[in-house]
C-alpha cells in the first residue's frame, strides 16, 4: 500500500467497511487504511478471508480488526459500531458495502427471495447507517471545531439507475440506497455528516467470472472506457467521498461504471 498524500490523509480516523472480506470491500478497507484510518473489517461467516484482509493492513503498519455479524439484523449493526468504538475510541467513516444479488424473473420472485435481498441491502444499510450516525453525532461534542463530522457511503449499483431483466428485487434495493443517501444527507448535514452513494458498474470479481469466464472482454466491449471496472476503481472513488476535500459533496450518487450508464448496452 502506498503512503497517503497530505491532502488525502485519514490519520486519526476510524472506519467500518461492511462486506469487507473480499473483492470490492477488501479494496475499500485497504484503501482507507493506506490513508491512515483504523479499519473494522466487517464480514458474515468469512473469518479466514476477513483475517487475511486484516493481516495485509497490519503488515503495512496500519490498524485493523475483523468483526463477524449478520447485518440484516439491527442488533448486529449496533454491535458492529460498538466494536469500532471499543477498539479505536470513535467512528468517523461508515461504508455500507455488504449486499447480495438474486437473479430471477419478476413473476418468479417469491417472498423469501424478496426478504433476503431487501433485509441485507436496504434494511441492513439503513440501520447500519443509523447506528453509525448516532455515534458520529454523539462524539462531535468532543471535537466541536472539527469540520469532519463523519462520512457515510452506500454501495449502490447502476442497476438502480437502469433496468435490467431478472434484477427486479436487487435493482429496487439499489435505487433505494440512492434515495436513502439523499434523505440522510438532508437530515445529517447539520451535524457535519455527509452521505453519498456509489453506483457501481460491471466489476471484475470472482462471482462475475464464475458466471462468465470472458466477463472482462464482454463488458469492455460496451463500456465507453473500453475496459471492465476493478475493485480498485471503486475504492478510489470511495476515498474521495470520505476525504476532507469532499466536505461539500453530499446527497450525491457517484457512478463508477466506465460510462456504461451513458449507453446502457449489455453484452
Image (cartoon, rainbow, N blue to C red):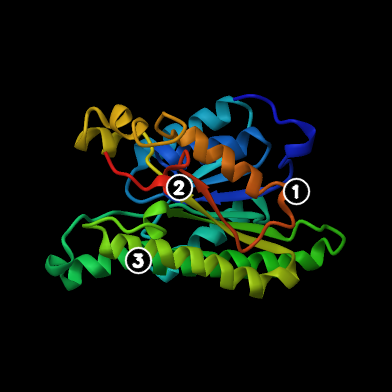
**Secondary structure at numbered mark 1:** helix
Identify residue for label 1.
244
Mark 2 burial class by Cα count in 10 Å: few <14, some 14-19, many 20+: few
The N terminus lies in quadrant: top right
Q: Which mark is residue 262?
A: 2
Relative to 116, residue 34 above or below:
above
Q: Circle 3 — which element? A: helix
- Asked if one can make out residue 75 in the rendered structure from this viewpoint, the answer is yes
Specify whether residue 63 is in view: no
Quarter of the image holding residue 184? bottom right
Q: Mark 3 points at which residue?
A: 172
User: Going 28% across and 54% down the picture, which residue do you hit?
Assistant: 101
> In the picture shown, does residue 128 fall above or below 267?
below
119 on left or right of 153: left
| Contact check, label 3 and label 2, Cβ < 8 Å | no
Q: Which of 65 and 186 is in front in this view?
A: 186
Q: Mark 1 or mark 2, which has the lower sequence index? A: 1
Of helix, strand and loop, which one carries label 2? helix
Q: Position of residue 159 (x, y in %)?
A: 36, 55
Amino acid at each position: 500500500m502506498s503512503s497517503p498524500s497530505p491532502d488525502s490523509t485519514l490519520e486519526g480516523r476510524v472506519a467500518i467497511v461492511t462486506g469487507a472480506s473480499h473483492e470490492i470491500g477488501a479494496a475499500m478497507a485497504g484503501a482507507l487504511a493506506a490513508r491512515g484510518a483504523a479499519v473494522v473489517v466487517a464480514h458474515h461467516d468469512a473469518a479466514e478471508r476477513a483475517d487475511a484482509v486484516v493481516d495485509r493492513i497490519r503488515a503495512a503498519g496500519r490498524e485493523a480488526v475483523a468483526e463477524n455479524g449478520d447485518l440484516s439484523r439491527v442488533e448486529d449493526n449496533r454491535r458492529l459500531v460498538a466494536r469500532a468504538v471499543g477498539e479505536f475510541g470513535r467512528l468517523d467513516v461508515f461504508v455500507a458495502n455488504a449486499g447480495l444479488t438474486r437473479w430471477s424473473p419478476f413473476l418468479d420472485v417469491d417472498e423469501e427471495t424478496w426478504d433476503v435481498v431487501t433485509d441485507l441491502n436496504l434494511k441492513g444499510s439503513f440501520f447500519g447507517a443509523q447506528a453509525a450516525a448516532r455515534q458520529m453525532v454523539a462524539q462531535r461534542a468532543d471535537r466541536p471545531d472539527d469540520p469532519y463530522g463523519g462520512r457515510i457511503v452506500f454501495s449502490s449499483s447502476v442497476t438502480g439507475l437502469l433496468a435490467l431483466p431478472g434484477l427486479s428485487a436487487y435493482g429496487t434495493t439499489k435505487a433505494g440506497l440512492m434515495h436513502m443517501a439523499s434523505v440522510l444527507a438532508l437530515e445529517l448535514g447539520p451535524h457535519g455528516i455527509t452521505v453519498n452513494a456509489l453506483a457501481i458498474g460491471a466489476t471484475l470479481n470472482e462471482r462475475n467470472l464464475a458466471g462468465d469466464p470472458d466477463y472482462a472482454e464482454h463488458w469492455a466491449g460496451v463500456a465507453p472506457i473500453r475496459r471492465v471496472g476493478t475493485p480498485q476503481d471503486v475504492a478510489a472513488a470511495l476515498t474521495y467521498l470520505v476525504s476532507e476535500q469532499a466536505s461539500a459533496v453530499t446527497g450525491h450518487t457517484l457512478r463508477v461504471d466506465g460510462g456504461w450508464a451513458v449507453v446502457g448496452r449489455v453484452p
